[in-house]
């Protein structure tokens, strides 16, 4: 399946900037999304948008897409991308043609799986010697344990094998790699930023995108992880404006990859922010063990 959250967020960036969207899939017809929360505002808005739902329920087959009719292609992620898109030669041809006619190519999360086998007219891989990112090995091992062994390859490894200059940020924080007209994003949190970068690449001045509560909260986390110790103050002083339970869960996972005293200190601070909202004995125990480790 594909990630409905990523589709919804990207779609509204494009729609709000006056960009007409068509939808394609390997077989065409109705496409299946991975499990998602239909009550999230951006998903709920898509579900009542009759025009785009009609296109989702009757997608174009990739072998019927006329690349000359498009200025850009955007590939959403989801586990299905890892199974279907690397073998979709029709999609690869569309991507290569759009890129070579000076169009823009963008993909997010597992979406860059569509790029691993794309070759240009000179026989080189599209991603070779270009700044690229995608869902990382670290994220896969932390969040993809249920399906990781079913993949034919790790996406980060395959992109690097194809000659890409792979770059990334911390787990689940927004990161966009821009190399001319090739734009890639690391994870679902990166979706709005990737879509906005694509709008810019088309020569448009994007309107301000409304961030979801999750993305707004993780943007604060990113500032804190980058070294801004005061970044957490809004979460503490105005908890109703953020998703503090999300912060606590992030701290829990950040702890799993902690190596340095600073990592442990930051993990602890994040878990403490979310402790009350989570009210979870497992988080309480992790907090206590981390405090003990740090001698607090």
Image (cartoon, rainbow, N blue to C red):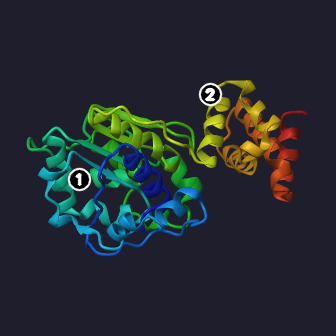
Identity of the residue drawn at 35% across and 33% down? 178
Q: Quadrant of the C terminus?
A: top right
Identify whether 158 is placed above or below 133.
below
Residue 141: image quadrant is: bottom right
Q: Is residue 278 or residue 42 the one in the foreground?
A: 42
- Label 1 – label 2 distance at C-alpha: 34 Å
Q: Quadrant of the N terminus?
A: bottom left
List x then y, in percent, for residue 114.
30, 55
Residue 226 is tagged as 2
Binning the other alpha carbons within 10 Å of mark 2 as few (below 14), some (14 to 19) or many (20 upward) gives few
Identity of the residue drawn at 82% across and 35% down? 237
| Disc with the residue nearer the chain's start (1 vs 2) | 1
Identify whether 247 is placed above or below 76.
above
Q: Is residue 144 or residue 26 the one in the foreground?
A: 26
In the image: residue 229, left or right of residue 135:
right
Q: Is residue 162 or residue 173 the one in the foreground?
A: 173
List x then y, in percent, for residue 204.
31, 34
Report which residue position mark 1 lands on: 117
Identity of the residue drawn at 61% across and 37% down? 219
SS for callout 2: loop
List x then y, in percent, for residue 207.
43, 36
């Amino acid at each position: 399946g594909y990630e409905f959250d990523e589709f919804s967020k990207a779609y509204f960036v494009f729609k709000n900037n006056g960009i007409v969207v068509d939808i394609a899939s390997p077989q065409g017809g109705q496409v299946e999304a991975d499990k998602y929360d239909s009550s999230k505002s951006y998903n709920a808005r898509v579900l009542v948008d009759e025009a785009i739902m009609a296109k989702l329920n009757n997608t174009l087959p990739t072998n019927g897409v006329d690349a000359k009719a498009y200025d850009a292609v955007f590939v959403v992620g989801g586990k299905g991308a890892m199974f279907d898109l690397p073998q979709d030669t029709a999609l690869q041809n569309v991507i290569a043609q759009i890129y070579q006619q000076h169009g823009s190519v963008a993909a997010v999360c597992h979406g860059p799986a569509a790029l691993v086998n794309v070759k240009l007219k000179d026989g080189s891989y599209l991603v070779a010697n270009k700044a690229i990112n995608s869902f990382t090995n670290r994220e896969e091992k932390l969040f993809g344990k249920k399906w990781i062994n079913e993949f034919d390859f790790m996406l980060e490894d395959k992109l690097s094998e194809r000659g890409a200059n792979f770059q990334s940020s911390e787990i689940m924080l927004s990161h966009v790699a821009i190399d001319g007209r090739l734009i890639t994003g690391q994870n679902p949190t990166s979706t709005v930023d990737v879509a906005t970068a694509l709008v810019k690449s088309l020569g448009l001045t994007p309107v301000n995108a409304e961030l979801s509560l999750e993305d707004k909260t993780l943007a604060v986390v990113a500032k804190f992880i980058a070294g801004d110790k005061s970044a957490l103050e809004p979460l503490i002083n105005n908890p109703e404006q953020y998703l503090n339970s999300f912060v606590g869960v992030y701290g829990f996972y950040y702890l799993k990859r902690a190596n340095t005293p600073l990592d442990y200190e930051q993990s602890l601070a994040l878990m403490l922010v979310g402790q009350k909202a989570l009210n979870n004995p497992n988080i309480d125990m992790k907090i206590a063990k981390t405090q003990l480790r740090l001698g607090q």
